[in-house]
Image: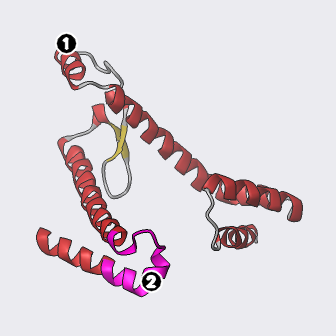
Amino acid sequence: MPGEIIRELIDKELAGNEVTPAEAAQRIVAKLNARHPGCLEQWFTDQAVHLMTREIGDLMRAGRGKAMSRAGTARFEAALEAGEDSPIGLYATWHAVNEENVRRRLADMTGADHGFVADTYRASAEADLMREAFHRTLAKKVGKRRTADVMTEEECERLLDSITRKAAGRTA
């Protein structure tokens, strides 16, 4: 199966290597084309819906990011007061508005939609704060050494669990 072949090449490429995703992908594609002709094309066909979904989501997020970076608060408020429907593109940005991942343009969102988006950002911020605390603690413990030279994976997991429990206790 193409997926199994590709997964095996990915695992081998990433095993113990310091590599960027782009470098790994280039090497894997070259190996697939040389050793398994047709495998990559079949894998793309098998993954077409998933890949297209991810590409569409990436484009929607990129549009939101561009609009947000261009949208000065004062300009946006002035345009709204003037009754402009899409003055700087912010209204055209897309957001997931429920658990089913339905997306709506900001202009079409309801109060409940905005509440869901706000909750998503809160959850993401809380998770980011826990990851920050975890990595800052590791930075102090590890110093100039490598993490694996200082502690085991199990010890890292216990550290993360302890930070997660502390954060959960604060929010309860």
Applied colour scheme: secondary structure
- Residue positioned 54% across, 50% down in the render: 53
Q: Is residue 116 left or right of residue 19?
A: left
Q: Position of residue 171 (x, y in %)?
A: 13, 68
From this view, report whether residue 62 is shown above or below residue 142.
above
Q: Is residue 20 left or right of residue 32?
A: left
- Residue positioned 61% across, 64% down in the render: 18
Q: Secondary structure at mark 2?
A: helix
Give the farthest residue toward the front. 144
Q: Position of residue 34 (x, y in %)?
A: 88, 60
Highlighted range, magenta: 140-159
Q: Quadrant of residue 85?
A: top left
Cα–Cα span, label 1 and label 2? 58 Å
- Residue positioned 31% across, 62% down in the render: 132
Whether residue 171 is visible here, answered yes or no, is yes
Q: Nearer the viewer, residue 32 or 41?
A: 32
Q: Secondary structure at mark 1?
A: loop
Q: Amino acid at mark 1?
A: Ala
Q: Is residue 111 left or right of residue 154?
A: left
Please give the residue where the numbered disc 2 appears in the rendered image: 153
Q: Position of residue 164 (x, y in %)?
A: 25, 74
Q: Quadrant of residue 170?
A: bottom left
Count residues near mark 1 (Cα–Cα under 10 Å), then give few for <14, some for 14-19, many for 20+.
few
- Residue positioned 22% across, 49% down in the render: 118
Please give the residue where the numbered disc 1 appears in the rendered image: 82
Looking at the rendering, in which quadrant would you find the N terminus?
Answer: bottom right
Looking at the rendering, in which quadrant would you find the C terminus?
Answer: bottom left
Q: Amino acid at mark 2?
A: Glu
Labels 1 and 2: the sequence-earlier one: 1
